[in-house]
Image (spheres, rainbow, N blue to C red):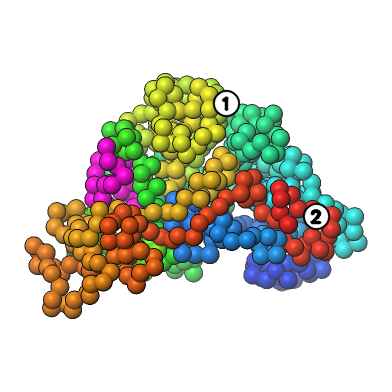
Amino acid sequence: MKKYSIYLLAFSMLFMASCDEDFMERYPQTSISPEEFFKTEEDLRLYVNGLLSLPGMFEYQQDQSSDNMATTGAIEIKSMMTGTPNSQNITGGWNWARLRNINYFLENSPNAAASPEAIQHYEGLARFYRAVFYFEMVKRYSDVPWYGQLLNPSDEELLYKGRDSRETVMNGVMEDLAFAAQHVREDVPSGTPGNWAVKTLYARVALYEGTFRKYHDELGLQGSANDFLTLARDLSKEIMDSGNFSLHQTGNPGSDYKALFNSQDLSGNSEVILFNPYDLNKDRNSDINYTVFGTYEQSPSRDLVQTYLMQDGSRFTDQPGFETLGYVEEFENRDPRMAQTLVYPGWVRAPEPDAFIPILSRNFTGYFQQKGYNNTTDNVALGSLDFPVYRYAEVLLTYAEALAELGSLTQADADISVNLLRQRAGMPDLQVSLVNAQPDAFLAAKHPNVSGPMTGAILEIRRERRVEFALEGYRYDDLMRWSSGKLLENIPEGMYFPGLGKYDLTGDGVEDIILIDKGADVPGDPQKETNSLGKMLIYYKAGTVDDNVTVYMENGSQGGTLVTETAERTFEDPKYYYRPIPFQQTTLNPNLEQIFGWE
């Protein structure tokens, strides 16, 4: 009975710790005796399960920070580019309580009466979680103090140490991941990280750090970039060669991709390496339909729409007049993943019988997201979608990108990686020699720091990443590691309308909406015009952001793209690739000096 109570106590403390930062500062050393708890493998399992923290459905909101989305939310990077950021108003992120919980386990777990294999398995999981923790800290601050052991209040020298170099910290991260990759078991409970999930994250970190060092001159670490890229290549190839995973496909390019994001059970999916299971019946609610679909805070950008290729593999941005194509025309003959990610003309929203008419609204683009949206009225189904945390598609693109950045991508390499994704989507293969001979000028202008004989391949792989992972929360990190932050200065735009008048937004050739001048009055229902189907047109008053209207347009009544905001954005390079340590922390510990121009 005493043993059972200790299990409950440990689990409840970990749960409470996730909700209460002050509690976490006290936990665990003053709350539980290691002699009483760390005795068996079951104790190790219980504690490590309490450390489990998986990305979830709200990852779809992370793209608000990137050029994939327009947002009305107070997103940190947007506020930085439009305000006066400093260490006194950017205060999030500097929380070390989770690291303390991890290091507490690592210090005490060897004392358990368990097999060496079991102890190393759970140590590997804890070191995996520590690597994730520090990877996030490095992405935010670059240089941070590295603590590989548990600290006590008397350890003043360590408590008040300064920042360790990025090299030191990333060496620690890679050592932790190498240990985890060697010792974490393959056979683990569903929804928890096993050996292949560890190696997927290991490859992701290696690719991130390799490209970050390559493209960020301010670090002076270009000489070590290829070591990380080589590791990313080798790790991803190991996962590919294992034969344990394959892309999810049933031979239906029009729905196979979408099935990854509206499934209530990903446990048997061949592509999913790690997933976050949700079940409304077990109080695990995944429903974020109000966020991914609707006029709440976020909407996909026109720049994302223009990234997708034509279905024949040609570039949309090579089409004459692509800049002035309307919503219906934009979706014609495009990469099938586009219509499985965004709401397309003719899409029907349950339980309505007719095609959905996109809602135009101030500060929004007019485009709607359907990735991650469950088009049903079943409340249990709405709240029980699993989330794919790591999927095999990422491994394939990590392999292709690492090789391209190393300058050694061959057609055979593309055929076993990026082209598998294109084939699943029903798209033509990437021809390495062709794209290198004729790089996309539209993409090249966005990424002017890409050069060399592999320029075309690198740009196309970046396109593929943006398309394959659209709205899943990858894009911001990609822009940061590629040193492409200047792209965030571009204010997201929405649908294009050539001027006032009537427009078809469902693709049936019949007008659905009417844009009227800012000075006109919207008539009452009896006086509204109807279309040839006898349905009333939806009225919008169009003008600029300074007008009292229902939609903002680039040129007011003269048309243009929908406008989401007007505040000028400035991305300071390299400063804004990092964040300042909060002022309160540098006051408490003067050894924590600001870097890259932060004050």
Check residue 340 for magenta coloring.
Answer: yes
Q: Amino acid at mark 2?
A: Leu
Dot 1 crowding, Cα within 10 Å, few <14, some 14–19, many 20+: some
Number of numbered discs: 2
Disc number lying in front (1 or 2): 2
Which region shows up in magenta?
A: 320-344
Check residue 348 for magenta coloring.
Answer: no
Q: Visible in this render: residue 246?
A: no
**Foreground: 337 or 582?**
582
- Please give the name of the residue rendered at 57% of the width and 26% of the height, measured from the top-left corner: 406
Q: Position of residue 189 (x, y in %)?
A: 56, 52
Q: Position of residue 280 (x, y in %)?
A: 44, 67
Q: Quadrant of the C terminus?
A: bottom right
Looking at marks 1 and 2 on the same chain, the residue that comes earlier in the sequence is marked by: 1
Q: Is residue 333 left or right of residue 257?
A: left
| Depicted 332 relative to depicted 59: above or below | above
SS for dot 1: helix
- Please give the name of the residue rendered at 26% of the width and 71% of the height, measured from the top-left corner: 519
Q: Is residue 29 left or right of residue 517?
A: right
Q: Amino acid at mark 1?
A: Leu
Residue at the disc numbered 2: 592
Q: Visible in this render: residue 507?
A: yes
- Please give the name of the residue rendered at 59% of the width and 33% of the height, measured from the top-left corner: 232
Residue at the disc numbered 1: 406
**Foreground: 473 or 257?**
473
Q: Quadrant of the N terminus?
A: bottom right
